[in-house]
Amino acid sequence: MPYATSPDGVKLSYQVRGAGLPLVLLQGQANDHHWWDTVRGDFDGSHLTITFDWRGTGNSDKPDVPYTTRGFAADVLAVLDDAGVARAHVYGTSMGGRVAQWLAADHPSRVGALVLGCTSPGGAHGVERDNDVRRSLVQPDRAAARRALLELMYTPAWLAEHPGPYHTIGSRGMPAHARRRHLAASAGHDAWDALPAIEAPTLVVHGTDDVFNPAANAPLLAGRIPGASLRWIEGARHAYFEEFRQVASPLVLEFLDGAASLLP
């Protein structure tokens, strides 16, 4: 298993699969690369897919220091450098989409096309989840809180047919300090002023029924990034890419195929 080293010396575990034009897949907050397990095969038949475990998750180091979404973007660059990839398409979901915004804004020469899924610009302009959602996630009954999280990710009908395991509700064995650091990084994200500088062709994808990262964020991003397009996944919640993979994966692949000329 290869490891990259971040600018501040953190060891980052990463994974490379498939063949073709490189595609970086960035998962949500407090999750490792297994977030992509059920859908990665949709992409690595035509792309060299690159994933990694955020600092604080999986097999990467877990330092108890401040994390930021911009800092996570620097970690992505360290992985690309170690893998010998000069330029890649980037598909970021949830917090991974926040990180992807910084990658595209700060390092345009490293990003071909950009896909931002179920994410937000953050800051004063982002639309936050409501207090009922917040309370459901911090209730004392841990089983009830877990169920609430699952129902924010997936529809009840899908959950009834898919008993798990689930790969989108947190990295197994993640220490408490790293969870707090991830939460602070995601909550502190604010790329609003940087978004107009993004040059990469951009697709924004969001489930219409997402209240975990409210769907109202999608048109904000699409309207702020020059030339961005917006596609809705009807009836989907936060994990649209998994439950609605038969719609979402072809949609993203079609967009990436149209931008193939942007990569060497």
Image (spheres, grey):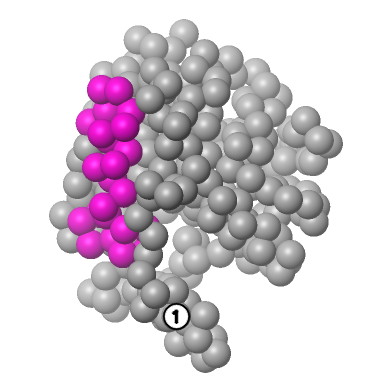
Residue range in magenta is 207-229
**Amino acid beneath label 1:** Arg
The total number of labels drawn is 1
In the image as oriented, which residue stretches furthest toward the front?
Answer: 124
Secondary structure under the numbered disc 1 in the rendered image = helix
The residue drawn where x is 80% and y is 56% is: 64
The residue drawn where x is 31% and y is 49% is: 217
- Please state which of residues 13 and 93 is positioned toward the viewer in this rendering: 93
- Please state which of residues 186 and 241 is positioned toward the viewer in this rendering: 186
Residue corresponding to mark 1: 135
Q: Quadrant of the N terminus?
A: top right
Q: Position of residue 96 (x, y in %)?
A: 49, 44
Q: Position of residue 51 (x, y in %)?
A: 56, 39
The residue drawn where x is 77% and y is 30% is: 7
**Image height of 118 relative to 106, above or below:** below
Left or right? Give the position of 244 relative to 87. Answer: left
Q: Position of residue 76 (x, y in %)?
A: 61, 33
